[in-house]
Image (cartoon, rainbow, N blue to C red):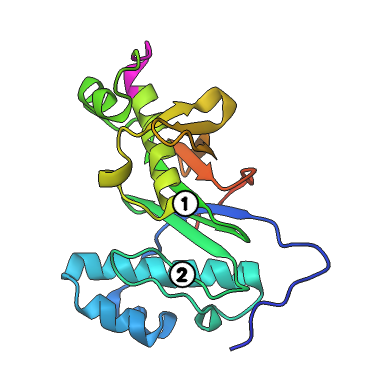
Amino acid sequence: MAAMQSGPEPKQPQLWCGPLPEWTVEQLPPLVSADELAWGKSLPCRRQLVFLKTRALVRQQLGHWLGCEALSVPLHAPPAGYPDLPAGWGRVSWSHSGQQLLLGWSPHCLGVDLEPADRLVRGEALWLRLCPGEPPPARLAEGVLQRWVALEAVIKRRRSSVAVELGQWSFLLDQSRALHRDRQQDVDVVVQRHWLQGRSWWVAWSGGEMPAVVSDEAG
């Protein structure tokens, strides 16, 4: 399969958000790869449906961005693994929250995350784990959610895990930065609040300048 053809200018990063479509299991086989179908069949029924819907929707959106058929996108995204595209096709990252999907693409490494702004959290306990030794903000729940999506975006960009990264970063969100406490590594991360599909969400992007969020009400 040929690599993505580049134009005279590098393709710009993309960010899209929308609900998972109301597809049934019977409708999904033509929309996903043979590997994805096999992986899906190994999952519990409820998780299988979300897994296959996600891959089908990601393929549709990537095909739109990259100018090819959805099934021609050389996406490798097994369960519980980071999604991959071959060299020349860029990088992809996504995040679920309920039936909502946030999808990002960039020529470079990136990570994205999404959480509803009204999500109930154990603010004090989570703050102590997220930001040990830092004074909590006055609006604790909001501060926790902002830093949680920032952490998840950084983790995905680094292809790491919560177990490794939790409590290791200081988030300077007014500067769109995260600073590693021990290694003094500086990573960009942007957190914004968006109104999407009738609800307020925290959206995080790590991977250079954050593109505008395109929202598809129809999914």
Q: Which residue in the structure is indicated by mark 1? A: 157
- Asked if residue 183 shows in the view, the reply is yes
Residue at (29%, 68%) from the top-left corner?
79
Splitting the image into 4 quarters, where does residue 114 fall?
A: top left
Q: Which residue in the structure is indicated by mark 2? A: 84
Are circles 1 and 2 on residues that touch, CB within 8 Å? no
Q: Position of residue 86 (x, y in %)?
A: 54, 75
Q: Residues within 10 Å of mark 2 (few under 14, many from 20)?
A: some
Q: Position of residue 176 (x, y in %)?
A: 56, 31
- Mark 1 to mark 2: distance in Å? 12 Å
Does residue 181 sit above or below 12 in this rendering? above
Residue at (64%, 71%) from the top-left corner?
66
Left or right: 61, with 138 as reference point: right
Dot 1 or dot 2, earlier in sequence: 2
Q: Position of residue 100 (x, y in %)?
A: 39, 51
Magenta-drawn segment: 136-141
Residue at (71%, 62%) from the top-left corner?
11
Does residue 24 sit above or below 100 in this rendering? below
Overall secondary structure of the magenta section = loop
Does residue 159 sit above or below 133 in this rendering? below
- Residues 150 and 184: in front is 184
Q: Secondary structure at mark 1?
A: helix
